Amino acid sequence: MNKKILETLEFNKVKALFESHLLTEQGLEQLRQLAPTAKADKIKQAFAEMKEMQALFVEQPHFTILATKEIAGVCKRLEMGADLNIEEFLLLKRVLLSSRELQSFYANLENISLEELALWFEKLHDFPQLQGNLQAFNDAGFIENFASEELARIRRKIHDSESQVRDVLQDLLKQKAQMLTEVIVASRNGRQVLPVKNTYRNKIAGVVHDISASGNTVYIEPREVIKLSEEIASLRADERYEMLRILQEISERIRPHAAETANDAWIIGHLVDSCQGPLYPRKASSRS
């Protein structure tokens, strides 16, 4: 349609009225691309979908769809051979969860017949294996111990070594209390140290990591914990390497299904915003 006519109709202003009620990035993109049409079949389909969505809400008033973010760029990176980071995996996890919930909802739907919307529900994919893989990432962006046996083993060793360090330091606090300015364990340069009176600095073997401004206190990492601290640092490096390996492995597992996952995200956005949004508008504060 002629741009001048759209300006006269204030079409973009009309679209802007809907923007704050959309819940998905996909819905926002569809809104941006929305243009008037004279194609009767498209118009009939759109109204038929909204009519079915209205009937669906009458039958299932508590029906909700988990809002998702746009993942087209993430899936494109996968297809190009890139490995994803945890934040990107969480976006995919949310899409697969929404897809599974929608499929379950549709499969258990009773007392209502869908035609237009059924086409969308039936196009959703079910990837139980991928959903299982993505459980390795919790919502806080942490890779769970069960992601691999090696990661679990490394973290157990880190936990054990850190416990040993704490035990050694607690014993030293008791044994050397009279030599300390404070009976506490301090931290300097990422190392756990004891605040030793300068007059006793030669009485506690270890590495000096800092000296107080007054010069009265030296912060010493006791020799008894140096080896343990080095072991922990080495284990942390092993942990980082194993986490990278896990990211690469799961990227490879999801890569063949990138296109289908992106399509699922588009369908979810269509159901949430194109059909559900106009009938039951909500503020987009829940878009996340």
Image (cartoon, rainbow, N blue to C red):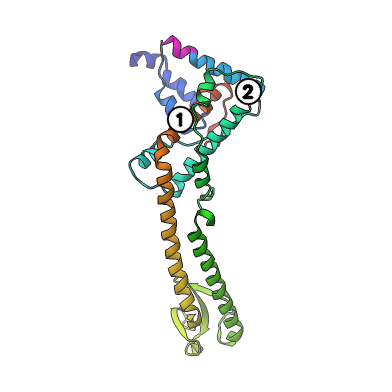
- Nearest the viewer among 280 and 6 is 280
- x and y percentages locating residue 31 in the rendered image: 44, 25
Say which label, 2 or 1, has the lower sequence index.
Answer: 2
Q: From mark 2 to mark 1, how far is it between C-alphas? A: 21 Å
Question: Image point 47% across, 32% down: which residue?
Answer: 264
Which corner quadrant of the image does residue 177 belong to? bottom right
> Magenta-highlighted stretch: main secondary structure?
helix
Residue name at image x 49 percent, y 16 percent: 46
**Residue neighbourhood size for the residue with mark 1, other residues' Cα within 10 Å, grouped as few (<14), some (14–19), many (≥20):** many
Q: Are marks 2 and 1 in contact (CB under 8 Å)?
A: no
Q: Please, what is the three-letter code of the amino acid marked with disc 2?
A: Phe
Quadrant occupied by the N terminus: top left
Q: Helix, strand, or loop for circle 2?
A: helix
Start-end of magenta stretch: 39-44
Instruction: Report the residue marked by disc 2.
Output: 57
Query: Which one is nearer the viewer's eye here, 26 or 12?
Result: 26
Residue 233 against residue 62 in the figure, above or below: below
Q: Is residue 19 above or below residue 6?
A: below
Q: What label does residue 266 carry, if any?
A: 1
Q: Residue at x 59, y 24 (%)?
A: 280
Horizontal and vertical percent for residue 187? 50, 72
Q: From the viewer's side, name the closer residue of 44 and 150.
A: 150
Q: Residues within 10 Å of mark 2 (few under 14, many from 20)?
A: some
Residue 4, quarter of the rendered image = top left
- Above or below for 129 versus 151: above
Instruction: Give coordinates of residue 185: x percent, y percent.
Output: 55, 75
Q: Is residue 60 left or right of residue 85?
A: right
Q: Amino acid at mark 1?
A: Trp
